[in-house]
Amino acid sequence: MTVALAVALVALVAWGANSPLGATAKANLPLFTSSVHAVDATQLGATWRPGCPVAPAQLRLVRLRFVGFDGRARVGSIVVNAKVVDAVIRVFAALYADRFPIKRMVPESHFGGSDPRSMAADNTSGFNCRYAVASGPHQWSVHAYGGAIDVNPVENPYLFDGAAQPAAGRAYLDRHDVRPGMAVPRGALTKGFASVGWYWGGRWSASPDYQHFSATGG
């Protein structure tokens, strides 16, 4: 991470503490921190295999602080493409300043590369070498390139063929009933990703994917 970005992140969190939400609400949170690490095939586990569109050397493990649903600071890990690391850190620094709650954040290797298991656990995740969940011929998901992130899948389900994925997301299909952790237009989550030029799957008309944010729009 560049020195300029590090300074900007500290300033962003400092702004959050002095925002209209009030310093008292922010005072019990430690400063936002992040670190970036190279990964190899062993660490990626079942999320990577030969033939995937990116090599382990093109990926990074990002460890960062986030706010849990209990309002406390947590440390999570997410794997993304090295090219998007700075953007991802900026987004999660903004979410931390806004105290946007995230349920869980571990690489999908903890779930054996199973996206359904990761979603059911309400896990926020990035890289996973898998095909897109869509009709038609198989094509790589943007997750297979490390250029997409799914946030709070239960609170932000993917509606595919009329069914919520994960199943627990059925309770959140009424997007007008806004509750903590949800992605909504002009909300903290959607604004955070939009600020770095990422696209929100919740705007897809046929099969909205409320959890999905990507650098490419796919």
Image (cartoon, helix red, strand yellow):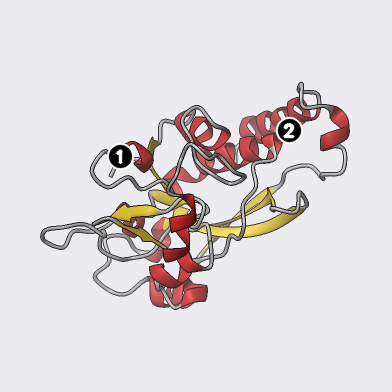
**Residue in view at x 75 percent, y 25 percent:** 15
Q: Position of residue 121 (x, y in %)?
A: 53, 68
- Give how far apart the Cα atoms at labels 1 and 2 are: 28 Å
SS for callout 1: loop
Left/right of residue 172 with respect to residue 160 in the rendered view = right
**Residue in view at x 31 percent, y 40 percent:** 216
Single out the residue that lies furthest toward the left.
137
Quarter where residue 37 is shown: bottom right
**Residue in view at x 73 percent, y 27 percent:** 11
- Amino acid identity at mark 2: Val
SS for callout 2: helix
User: Which label is found at residue 125?
Assistant: none
**Dot 2, how many residues are within 10 Å of its Cα: few (below 14), some (14-19), or many (20+)?**
many
Residue under numbered circle 2: 13
**Residue in view at x 18 percent, y 59 percent:** 139
Q: Nearer the viewer, residue 68 or 174?
A: 174
Tell me which numbered mark, 1 or 2, is placed earlier along the sequence.
2
Left/right of residue 179 with respect to residue 115 in the rendered view = right
Q: Quadrant of the C terminus?
A: top left
Residue under numbered circle 1: 217
Residue 159 versus residue 202 in the image, above or below: below
